[in-house]
Amino acid sequence: MQSTPHLDVLPPLVETGKTDELVESGRTLFTTVSPLNDSYAVFPAPLLEKLSTRSRSTDSGEQNIYLVSSKAPPSTERRLFIGDTSIIFAAMQNLRKTVDENGVYLTQPETIQRSIRKLALDYVNFAKECWIHTSRIAGEANLATADHYRSLYTCLSLFTILYLPEYGLENAPVGDDLMEWLNIHFIEPSTEEGDHLSGLERPWEDETYWPYLTRAILRGLSKAVTFFLGTLSEHPSGNLQRLAQSIIPLLSTQPKLQHFDAERDFAYASHRWKEKVRALRIELDDIPQSDRRDNFEDWWDRFSDIVGILEGREEVIRKVCEDLGADWREVCVAWGVFVDTRLRRQDLPDVVGQVLEDMPPDPTILEDMVHVALFMGDPLKALEHAAQLDPWLSAHLADMMEPLSLVEQAVNDESELSVRDFSVLSYAHYLHSDPAMWRITVTYMYSCGKVGTATADEILVRVPLRLQSKPSNANDGGDSQADQGDLSAIVKDVNATCHEYQREAVRRTVCKIAAQAFVQKKEFGLAISYCSSAEDWPGLGRVIDRVLQEYIHSGPEQYTRFVSGIAPSLQGLRTNTAAHGVFTHRLMFAVRYAEFHQRLLNRDLQDAAWDLVSMLQEGIAPKAWWAVLLCDAFELLQYDPTPLFSYAGTCVLLRRLDEIISRTAQGAGEDYLKILEAKLRIDGQKDTQKRLQLVRFALAKYFARCAMIGTGGTQTAPRRVDPTV
Amino acid sequence: MIQTGLIQNVHDDLLTDVSYDFYGLHFATCSLDQKIKVWSLDESTGIWSVEDEWKAHDAAISKVSWAHPEFGTILASASFDRTVKIWEQTTYAAAMELQPNTFSATQPATGGSSSRWSERATLVDARGTVRAVEFAPHHFGLKLATISTDNHLRIYECIEQSSLATWQLSEEVDVTSLPIASHPSSHSVALGTPTHTSATLDGASASLVAQALQQSQGSLQGRGGLGNREADGGWCISWCKERYWGEVIAAGSGISGTIKIVQISPSRRPTTLLTLDPSPTGKLLAEGNTAGAAQGESDAPTPYAVTTVAWAPSCGRSYHLIATGSRDGHVRIWKVKPAEENDMDDDSGGTKWTASIAADFDNHRSAVGRVEWNITGTVLSSAGNDGRVRLWKATIGGVWRSAGSIGVEQTEDEDANMDENAAGVAD
């Protein structure tokens, strides 16, 4: 998680302290940021003002690109953690929804708090499990990882104890709960010490004996305390033997809040217990000076400290903690158990403030700083430190803090974000360092109001669709159908996400990009369906143009094959009222023209001829294509065995030809001849005029033939109506 | 900060630009060696390899820009040869037969890659080095803006998307003499500053063209006065990413130390909506900036060029962030507020845009050559002649702070790190 604020890349471009050399050699540094994961490409670039004087050099490093990330992308185990906790986050969002949609609170505050507490405990348990899991895996790196989860675990559980107690217990004394927290997370005294001491015959002779005993008492570890006090029955001093016997029942009877139904009873019991401690003190003070030492220790002082702790003497607890090397946490928690047994959550900041004056926390340990802020009742500060420790922590804490009114719900005027949204967005930005986690990234972002939504849009629209990956392998015999299904998988996924968050503009952009990519792959059918999904009618027109270009470039066989892929879309588009007529019309022409070529290829010449005429007559063929169609007619006109065109049909051809020729003469040739020109160029010819003259000649011949054999004129029966269009 | 990779010997000479595509899975590099290379990322290994490379211009290339993918895979390159060229990647084999200028992948490592880049158009209107080119946001169609040392901002629109062959020069304006939109009182162009009296830009730009040409031919020239001349002309552009305000672009030209926010409209000539002027004479200063006031108050400011500008994606915020980097060594972040709805003046179509400096950093202590935002407009990166890349991030209260830096200096424990990084190194 931690990363250095400054990095010098390798290999270096200049020696230590000689950055000036960069400019002197006519170079500067440039950078550009990747939309994929916010990583930076850093490279030396020429200084423009020294360009002309710069001698071209081929030094190594001159043409390097250094790739740098501000944070390491999440590891596999971290990804699991992120993924799994996002489920708890999602549950939290559902809870937030029931709050927001209905103004203030639809559900009882009690239900809300219970639910949040339950989810908070889920986070706590999850962090705990990750900690246990990672600490089981050996290795240096894992040790650090495990420690990181441990710190999340301590922060989350402290947050839960201080800010999410069981409903109704907000005002209950907090000492016992905090002691439990301390004992779970910061285990002292260590088991090893206990094992060592229990193996000794006269443990009090060991230098660790009294510190161990004192700490165990401070921590309320009654079993260990009873055992080791019991060993004092062998101590040479009869006084100490007696004192040890008197203190054992006291320790086991110290009132615990959880054993009482009413706090009043607890307070009363505590008071009575304190009186017994006082009696013990009197007994202790009666010990003559002569018997206050054994051969190793001034045991009386040690015992006096222990009684002092039980009496709740502040100065003793502080001194003992300092001697034991314990930190401010231990003092504060002991305070709530011994000094002020009725210490409440709201009183903590005062106590902690006093303790910190003498025992300041280590500002470099972020975990401690989060603890301090939580103890001090400063959620904002806690978030600030948590963000440095792990953006995950600040995001999820802030997400719980807002409904608990621990942080302001109002947006900041500058960033236009609430505290919660700012924290959650920061985390989401961190998630963006791993592009594979885009689903989780946008989920977090979409929970953050207007700014979050717009931010998520930027991420979502840039999810790589992977439609054109490895075009070279597309033809290596793989099942093309499966290939397609696979290829659109991410588009469909992104589309579904857009639907979920109602991001229509993003969805359309993504569909447009997909359509364009499919055009490049010559998957025209898919391209058309994505165009219509995006309601991008000009785009649809361009796709059809590309299909028609296939005819010009690759000839009729290829063309008819492509059109068979797009023909089904025509039906769908006709029923779609939003579809723009012009483009549907062009699609219709593409389909009809393919049918015509299919008939030609099948030698169904009679029908082909009829198709040709009707495309021109019904105005389906665009003007730019007329000349191409007329050239297609050339062969049909020449067909010897039987005349294929009716007299009327031939007249249609002639009229179109006349229009082309006369308009070309008027200078509008571009409109009429462009396609034919392109087609002829592919065929290795140039002169469109010559081609059209040939068509005119063929038409003239055909008319003559009609007149000769009497098939022309009105005698020809009208042809059947073609049902295909 | 961690180094995740290294690409060595990217070109035969210094790189002038690296530009990521829309997704960040490819980038295009260009160089003084007149070539463009397109690289692709193997996500499984994290290794970048050359997909295509070709000689693209007759002089050094200054910038490359990718078009939005809804238009296809299209690049524009700007060069010291005074042209901008449009390139399209296509697997459309037949179409290439129409195009004489086709370049094939020369990298054998890419194996059966069938990708090709074809020159689709050459835009030859600039009368000086084209220093920047940037495609417009996709919702405005397939358009691009260029700025060159002749001080001109040019907007081109693709007439025929299927061929990319025809580009109409829809706007061509001298940035230094742009008309100001209505309400001149609400924003100011610091015409009275010594900047303008000391340099006659028109005269300078003519010689600049010749000079740029000489430079591009590699001829050596005496250094006298070179620095001054190089500071002239158009430097940088950055489009407003948002659709709502129409086509708006930030442009920097000359040595006035300012950036102009220019509105492009089909119905009338481009106008300046706002001038970002950090000098004390700039009236904007009165609108809340205190950071920059300390400098330059005592002496008349030295003229300097703003060489880089970056308009952040607004991402739902009510204001815009525009970052500038200039030769006075400052990185500035401007908070720009578009006109309120009721401020609209129908007669002139002008709007009251206002700006204030949200941050002003002089940490580079030398000319700043690049500023760039990440895609969510949350992190600004700046690069300067101090050999540092610096990152900047805002707190919730809008206070911008350093978020890390990258250097190229040798470090003490270099040897130790060398081995560690070797694994991630790719050529």
Image (cartoon, coloured by chain):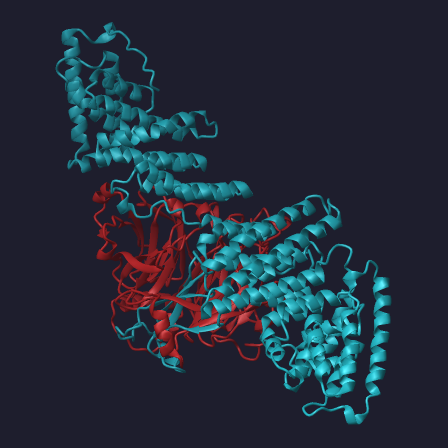
Chain colours: A cyan, B red
Q: Is residue B191 visible?
A: no
Image quadrant assignment for residue A619 = top left
**Image quadrant where one finds the C terminus of chain B:** bottom left
The tally of labels here is 0
Q: Vertically, is A635 above or below B186?
A: above
Image x and y of residue A365, in percent? 58, 74
Q: Is residue A454 left or right of residue A301?
A: left
Q: Furthest-top residue in view?
A: A715
The residue positioned 83% from the left and 69% from the top of the image is A270
Where's residue A439, x and y in %?
Answer: 49, 49
Q: Is residue A719 above or below residue A528?
A: above
User: Is A496 in front, or is B369?
Assistant: A496
Asked whether the viewer can see residue B99, the reply is yes
Residue that lies at the very extreme toward the bottom in this rendered image: A290
Quadrant hosting residue A516? top left
Which residue is painted at 24% across and 30% down in the image? A665
Toward which corner of the image does residue A34 lie, by quadrant? bottom left
- A180 relative to A457, above or below: below
Residue B313 x %, y %: 51, 55
In terms of depth relative to the viewer, which is nearer, B255 or B112?
B112
- Left or right of residue B265: residue A418: right
Q: Position of residue A459 (x, y in %)?
A: 48, 52
State the residue in front, B124 or B268: B124
